[in-house]
Image (tube, rainbow, N blue to C red):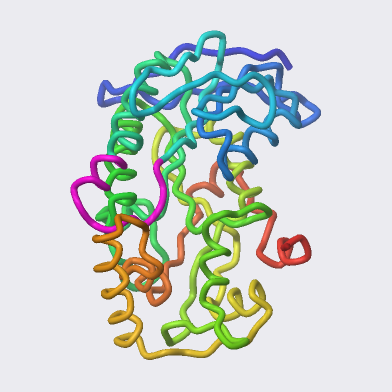
Amino acid sequence: MTDRLPSPVTGADGRPGSLHVAVTRADGRLGNLRIAVTGASGFCGGVVARTAAAAGARVVCLGRRPGPVGESRFWDATRTVPDLTGTDLVLHLAAAVGDPPPGRAAEAAFRAVNVDGTARLLKAAAGRPVVWVSSASVYAPPGAGPIREDHPLAGLTAYGRTKAAGERLALEAGAVVLRPRAVYGPGDPHLLPRLRRAVRGGRALLPGPDIPLSLTAVENLADACLTAHAWPSGAYNIADAPAYRRDDVVAAACGVPVRHLPIPLVDAIAAIATSVARVTRREPALSRYAVEQLTTGVVLDISRAREQGWTPHRTFADFLPARP
């Protein structure tokens, strides 16, 4: 089929509606579009960029470091408007991530990328379809049952708060917003290394009890990024099909049994680590937010994305043979 870009559409409320791009040929590969991928030098962005190139797209990587494929263009999200010249579709994965000690400096640093950088990107997009990758960290603590996209937002860290603010800008501009949780896969620099730091004396020490949780294989996220341009504007949870048990995941990832520690004890250790981090200005070895992530069951309802035809094919079991 012929690649084409229709004009933006307007919803009933007068705001920009979803922007659709016919990019998939009959053989299931992407058409000869130029796809801009921000944050392509990072873990998720790199996988998305390589997946897009393998599917036949011409990829333009934007960031402070070169991307893994295609053309690279320098972009400092804290200072400049990105050069999207000649691109047809924007996949925005650039973000300030981490769990820094609380304070104005951290909040400002995260806002400069996740909010102000988003505003610069949307200005440059100028009517192009945008898929904006957010995070389930924007959600308030869960209640009973899986979290749907209309769950209240209340980011508990600088990361969560600024991602929520950035995605509001993206939604107002008619973008598609994806909310993955705990992305993992080969080369993961965040989730699995943190879990492995819990190993002491041949056991993984975790605040008990065991909980259910959603995880997102990076390949599932990449598939969503490359199809979501055709979805109606709005927010979509992205996660693996099954809900996992925390202890099973940690035991499999670390190759050791799990031992439970009292939550108050771990909270106290996290409080001390956070106090030390305020002085050293380094990310704490264990934060209260990390403890909450390990003790609060968060399961995402992904039915809205499924209704658009997206199916998560990868699971944590697929990853285990490839782990280092």
- Quadrant housing residue 59: top right
Q: Position of residue 167 (x, y in %)?
A: 34, 38
Report the residue that reaches farthest toward the right.
Answer: 27
- As for residue 104 lying within the magenta part, the answer is yes
Rendered-image quadrant of the N terminus: top right
Q: Against 241, is 58 above or below?
A: above
Report the residue that reaches farthest toward the left.
Answer: 104
Report the residue that reaches farthest toward the front.
Answer: 280
Residue at 47% x, 17% y is: 128
- Quadrant housing residue 8: top left
- 157 sits to left or right of 24: left
- 198 sits to left or right of 268: right
- 307 sits to left or right of 155: right
Magenta stretch, residue numbers: 96-110
- 57 sits to left or right of 280: right
Q: Position of residue 185 (x, y in %)?
A: 65, 55
* Closest to the observer, 114 or 32: 114
How many labels sit on residues? 0
* Closest to the observer, 292 or 33: 292
Report the residue that reaches farthest toward the top.
Answer: 86
Rendered-image quadrant of the C terminus: bottom right
Residue at 65% x, 72% y is: 253
Q: Against 16, is 313 above or below?
A: below
- As for residue 177 lying within the magenta part, the answer is no
Residue at 59% x, 66% y is: 242
Residue at 25% x, 26% y is: 13
Q: Position of residue 316 (x, y in %)?
A: 66, 65
* Closest to the observer, 213 or 69: 69
Q: Position of residue 78 (x, y in %)?
A: 34, 28
Q: Against 319, is 81 above or below?
A: above
